[in-house]
Image (cartoon, rainbow, N blue to C red):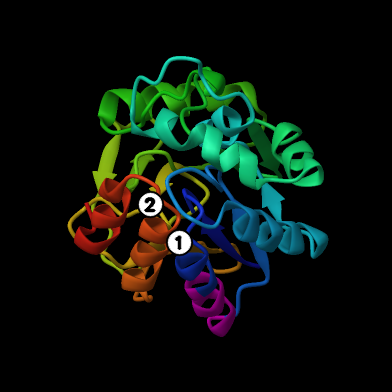
Amino acid sequence: MKLALLSDIHANIHALDACLAHATDRGAQQFAVLGDLVGYGADPAAVVNRVLGLVADGAWVVKGNHDAVALAPPAEIKNFGDATAAWTGAQLDAPQRKFLQNLPFTLQLENILLVHASVDCPELWRYVSDHRAAGASLAASSAWSDVRYVFGGHVHLQSLYCRGIGADLMKVVPTPGVAVPVHEHSHWLATIGSVGQPRDGNPRAMYAMLDTGTSHLTFHRVAYDHLSAAAAIRRAGLPTFFADRLEWGR
């Protein structure tokens, strides 16, 4: 099975459609969306509808922090994400809101565990951005039987960690388009990056593809019309910083 893993779409329909087309062209047979469908971007309803279409075809989806905050915007704005939460929630109809509300924090599918942030208290939205956090997330995944792969997003960067039998946690720096062997005798954790808001200085969208038949994981970068996505944010009257981010890729 070829499993396409997408996360942190952030209401960017331009990037999502580009990644879906890219994955389909490469033979994706199953899709998983790892949270933050909405937030920051100009097209939350379109993105949720697109993901609902994937779900109708069997896709797996977990909840992200921006999905949660869009349904219950905070009274006090403390960060940029809070600034768009009320606007985002107002764009969604009742069925879309119910869909986001009912998403699980984690989802296990055989030896694969999906989560938005860390498996260690996923509802606290902890960032898996270093060896310590990756180790804590992997350790927490042992509560699920037979899990060999943990896939998450949240950090908007692509990374891969590996723990073999009796070995220290090792970080692998992925190269886009190059398949990495991820054999089941080891324990793996990957952050698959952001479809809709990359933050590494490169505006190209991010996703990953796991081939369970060959035990290879490939991280991808996909060019898309990020200038149109940025223009849509400005037309919607959202903070221009979010449009600038798409143009800068950071």
- Residue located at (41% from left, 32% from top): 83
Main SS category, magenta section? helix
Q: Is residue 102 left or right of residue 11?
A: right
| Residue to which mark 2 is pinned | 193
In-front residue for pair 78/203: 78
From the viewer's perspective, is residue 59 above or below residue 35?
below
Coordinates of residue 53 in the picture (x, y in percent): 75, 64
Q: Answer yes or no: is residue 148 visible.
A: no
- Residue located at (60% from left, 58% from top): 47
- Residue located at (56% from left, 48% from top): 37
In-front residue for pair 237/89: 237
| Residue to which mark 1 is pinned | 208
From the viewer's perspective, is residue 181 above or below residue 134?
below
Picture quadrant of residue 35? top right
What's the amino acid at mark 1? Ala
Q: Secondary structure at mark 1?
A: strand
Q: Answer yes or no: is residue 87 visible.
A: yes
What's the amino acid at mark 2? Gly
* Mark 1 in CB contact with mark 2 (< 8 angstroms): yes
- Residue located at (47% from left, 32% from top): 117
Magenta part of the chain: 18-26
Judge whether residue 233 is colored magenta: no
Judge whether residue 25 is colored magenta: yes
Q: Secondary structure at mark 2?
A: loop
Within 10 Å of the Cα at label 1, are there few (<14), some (14-19), or many (20+) other Cα atoms?
Answer: many
Coordinates of residue 112 in the picture (x, y in percent): 61, 45
Picture quadrant of residue 163? top left
